[in-house]
Image (spheres, rainbow, N blue to C red):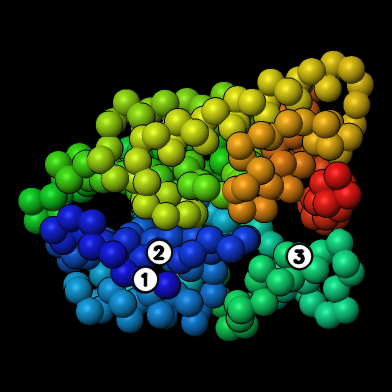
Amino acid sequence: MKLEKIAPHVYACLQKDTGFGWNNSGFVTTGGGLVIDTFWDLPHTQQMIDLYRQVGPQPPRYLVNTHHNGDHVWGNQLFAGADIIAHRLCREAMATGIRPADFQKIFADPVPPERQWVANDIAVYDFSGIDITLPNHLIEERLDLELDGIPCHIFYVGPAHTSSDLMVHLPEQGILFTGDIVFNQCTPLGWEGTNDKWIDAIDRLISLEPKTIVPGHGELCGVPEAKELRNYLESVYTQARHFFDRGLPPLEAARQIDIGPYFHWTEPERLIWNVSRAYREFRGDPWDAPFGDRIQLFHQAYELRQHWDRQ
């Protein structure tokens, strides 16, 4: 975990992406302080807070949850006194979604080989003691803040990666916090939404011409990396359509899809989620309909990796 200054009064807390859960956060130190996203457990979130304490006000006045996935919100309770800003659908998903203890059980010993790779990813996290703390400032489309001379625009771009995606834009600094709309050099994973909405979200961020992007996962980047992610999503979607029309099941389609230059991205086997989500769209199912059993998808990702390793 490292703290990086990216403009006067603006910082990013970055974690090296090594698999599931290694997300980033941001901090604007003016206007009472605004934090973008927490980390997956309390110890890592506290470590982030300790870094932020070195450069700005604690506790901060605002916390933004860019979406409802646990790695971005399960540290909220350490900001319980803040104005926690999120989309309405973020709060709804947090209120009804999986609890940390139940999530941990899925990967507890004895864990089958098909899930060991994820268990390895999350082994350093401690999901005990987490009290799901819901956002208390809900938005629909947009919220504009003035942080002592720094304009801050928070706007909705979902359903793309999830139902509740927000981005945070500091236009005068040319900085954009994208949440998981951008994965940099690591394989994206779509839980909900549609391919078109994700592409639209990327096109919107490109139109803003940010100088610096703080992605949900991976190192700081810019517009070229966002365009590369767009290319990945379009390539997978186009190839998946071909195999869907031929009647192949998602796993077999994933085995045959050529991801070319994106194979070196972190955990390319997440491809199975992206193919399965595309198949849901091709069937005409609603964007929030389940596209497969989540445990089975972990197993299919393992099978896909085994297939590639045999090549």
| Image vertical order of residue 51 relative to residue 144, above or below | below
Q: Quadrant of residue 219?
A: bottom left
Among numbered discs 3 and 2, the one appearing first in the sequence: 2
> What amino acid is labelled 3 in the image?
Trp
Q: CA distance from mark 3 to mark 1?
A: 25 Å
> What amino acid is labelled 1 in the image?
Lys
Residue 210 image offset from top left, x and y in percent: 27, 37
Q: Is residue 5 left or right of residue 83?
A: left
Q: Which residue is labeled 3 in the image?
A: 117
> What amino acid is labelled 2 in the image?
Leu
| Front residue (pair 307, 120) | 307
Q: Secondary structure at mark 2?
A: strand
Measuring 28% from the left and 64% from the top, which residue is drawn there? Answer: 4
Few, some or many residues within 10 Å of mark 2 (<14, 14–19, 20+): many
Q: Is residue 251 left or right of residue 195?
A: right
Q: Which residue is labeled 2 in the image?
A: 14
Q: Secondary structure at mark 3?
A: helix
Q: Residue furthest front?
A: 311
Among numbered discs 2 and 1, the one appearing first in the sequence: 1
Quadrant in the picture for the N terminus: bottom left
Among numbered discs 3 and 1, the one appearing first in the sequence: 1
Q: Which residue is labeled 1 in the image?
A: 2
Q: CA distance from mark 3 to mark 2?
A: 22 Å
Residue 131 image offset from top left, x and y in percent: 55, 75
| Front residue (pair 233, 286) | 233
Residue 93 image offset from top left, x and y in percent: 59, 52
Few, some or many residues within 10 Å of mark 1 (<14, 14–19, 20+): few
Quadrant in the picture for the C terminus: top right
Measuring 40% from the left and 64% from the top, which residue is drawn there? Answer: 14
